[in-house]
């Protein structure tokens, strides 16, 4: 799996995790969201999924967008070499302080770009 795909799946998983907390447990919507989460989880490599699960156990998001030169999670200034890696489209890294997966801002045309309503959907994945 390419890093851009992993990043997209992680972002989707984080969004679904937030959404499932907003709906009543046992509801039809909860079941649908859980099915979507299971599908996303099945596409992630075990090592990434295990790392995600360890971070998620604390109830926080496990991925954050870089805010300028700082981690979008803990606001710590990031090392220059990490920022250089994240400058490549589709690349992600890990914050050396809080451990969240990080990605740099992308253009509006990037299909992996998230909105406040969740991940965008590719036309061929509807």
Image (spheres, rainbow, N blue to C red):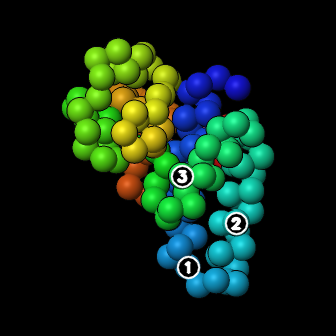
Q: Is residue 106 above or below residue 71?
A: above
Callout in the foreground (3, 2):
3
Q: Position of residue 63 (x, y in %)?
A: 46, 44
Q: Position of residue 78 (x, y in %)?
A: 29, 29
Tell me the residue at 25%/43% (across/down): 75
Q: Position of residue 69 (x, y in %)?
A: 23, 29
Do residues under tags 2 and 1 come within 8 Å of each other at their CB atoms? no
Q: Is residue 121 above or below residue 68?
A: below
Look at the numbered disc 2 and give the secondary structure of its residue. Answer: helix
Query: Is 95 in front, or is 91?
Result: 95
Identify the residue at the far front of this view: 97
Disc nearer the start of the sequence (3/1): 1
Residue that carries the numbered disc 3 in the rendered image: 55
Is 37 placed left or right of 96 in the picture? right
Is 57 placed left or right of 82 in the picture? right
Do residues under tags 3 and 1 come within 8 Å of each other at their CB atoms? no
Look at the numbered disc 1 and give the secondary structure of its residue. Answer: loop
Gap between marks 3 and 2, in whole Å?
19 Å
Neighbour class for label 1 at 10 Å: few (<14), some, many (≥20)? some
- Which quadrant of the structure image shows residue 4? top right
Gap between marks 2 and 1, in whole Å?
11 Å
Q: Is residue 49 above or below residue 14?
A: above
Is 96 placed left or right of 76 in the picture? right
Gap between marks 3 and 1, in whole Å?
22 Å
Tell me the residue at 40%/49% (across/down): 115
Q: Quadrant of the N terminus?
A: top right
Tell me the residue at 64%/83% (across/down): 25
Do residues under tags 3 and 2 come within 8 Å of each other at their CB atoms? no
Residue that carries the numbered disc 2 in the rendered image: 34
Look at the numbered disc 3 and give the secondary structure of its residue. Answer: helix
Residue that carries the numbered disc 1 in the rendered image: 23
């Amino acid at each position: 799996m390419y890093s851009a795909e992993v990043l997209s799946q992680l972002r989707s998983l984080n969004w679904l995790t937030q959404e499932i907390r907003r709906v009543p447990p046992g509801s039809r919507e909860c079941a649908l969201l859980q099915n979507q989460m299971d599908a996303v989880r099945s596409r992630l490599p075990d090592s990434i999924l295990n790392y995600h699960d360890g971070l998620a156990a604390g109830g926080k998001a496990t991925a954050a967008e870089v805010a300028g030169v700082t981690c979008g999670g803990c606001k710590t200034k990031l090392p220059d070499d990490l920022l250089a890696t994240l400058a490549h489209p589709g690349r992600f890294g890990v914050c050396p302080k809080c451990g969240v997966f990080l990605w740099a801002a992308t253009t509006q045309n990037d299909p992996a770009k998230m909105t406040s309503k969740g991940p965008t959907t590719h036309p061929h994945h509807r």
